[in-house]
Image (cartoon, helix red, strand yellow):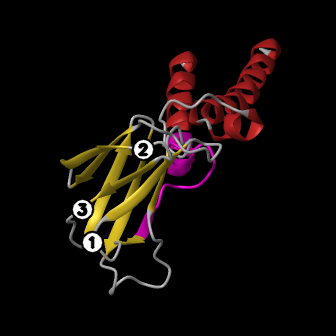
Amino acid sequence: MTGLRLIRGLAVCIAAAGLCVPQMAMAAIPQNGKAPGVYDVRLHESGALLGQVVSPESQPLAGVPVKLRTSGKELAGATSDKNGYFAFAGLANGVYEIVTPEGRGVYRVWSHAAAPPSAQPGALVVNGDDTVVRGQQAMRGFRDLMANPWFVAAVITAAVAIPVAVHNGRGSKSN
């Protein structure tokens, strides 16, 4: 009977610990700690969206296929030239996603006249960029171990179960 009570108590403790673990501890975190953002880009005076594909080391990449999407629909495709540059003509203001085989970026595109001062003259896409959020990250260090909900639950369970077992062990010796 006391064994069943102990199991029920442990189950309640584990459930309570699960509610106490912050949800952010279970979320995927980008490798560089920054969430991917939306970047402002102004169209060229001719109305074309200009861009460049580079490696993570900032080297231009030639011959990389580049796709332009909006709302999940592919609008156009291009290939980067020998200096990594590409262009898409005839675009209206809006939000576009530029995708390469190993990178992507989301850009808020403005007409040349309406663009805010902070808008860049072109889109920069890092092919092989590590800002892609991956759900299957290997644990790195003590901080990540402490953010693991299973580890936290095990520590809390041990903190409850060990004193209970010691107390119950002492009680059976005195009887």
Numbered circle sitting on residue 81 = 2
Residue at screen point 50% across, 80% down: 118
Q: Secondary structure at mark 3?
A: loop
Is tag 1's residue or tag 3's residue first in the polypeptide sequence?
1
Contact (CB < 8 A) between labels 2 and 1?
no
Tell us which disc is closer to us: 2 or 1: 2
User: Is-magenta flag for residue 72?
Assistant: no
Numbered circle sitting on residue 47 = 1
Is tag 2's residue or tag 1's residue first in the polypeptide sequence?
1
Question: Given the image, on which type of amino acid does mark 1 rest?
Answer: Gly
Alpha-carbon span between mark 2 and mark 1 = 20 Å
Residue 165 percent location from the top left of the image: 72, 21
Residue at screen point 62% across, 47% down: 58
Alpha-carbon span between mark 1 and mark 3 = 6 Å
Q: Which residues are magenta?
A: 16-40
Q: Is residue 78 left or right of residue 145?
A: left
Contact (CB < 8 A) between labels 2 and 3?
no
Which residue is under mark 3?
A: 89
Relative to 129, is 5 above or below?
A: above
Contact (CB < 8 A) between labels 1 and 3?
yes
Question: For residue 43, which quarter of the picture?
Answer: bottom left
Question: Given the image, on which type of amino acid does mark 3 rest?
Answer: Ala
Q: Residues within 10 Å of mark 1 (few under 14, many from 20)?
A: some
User: Is-magenta flag for residue 19?
Assistant: yes
Question: Given the image, on which type of amino acid does mark 2 rest?
Answer: Asp
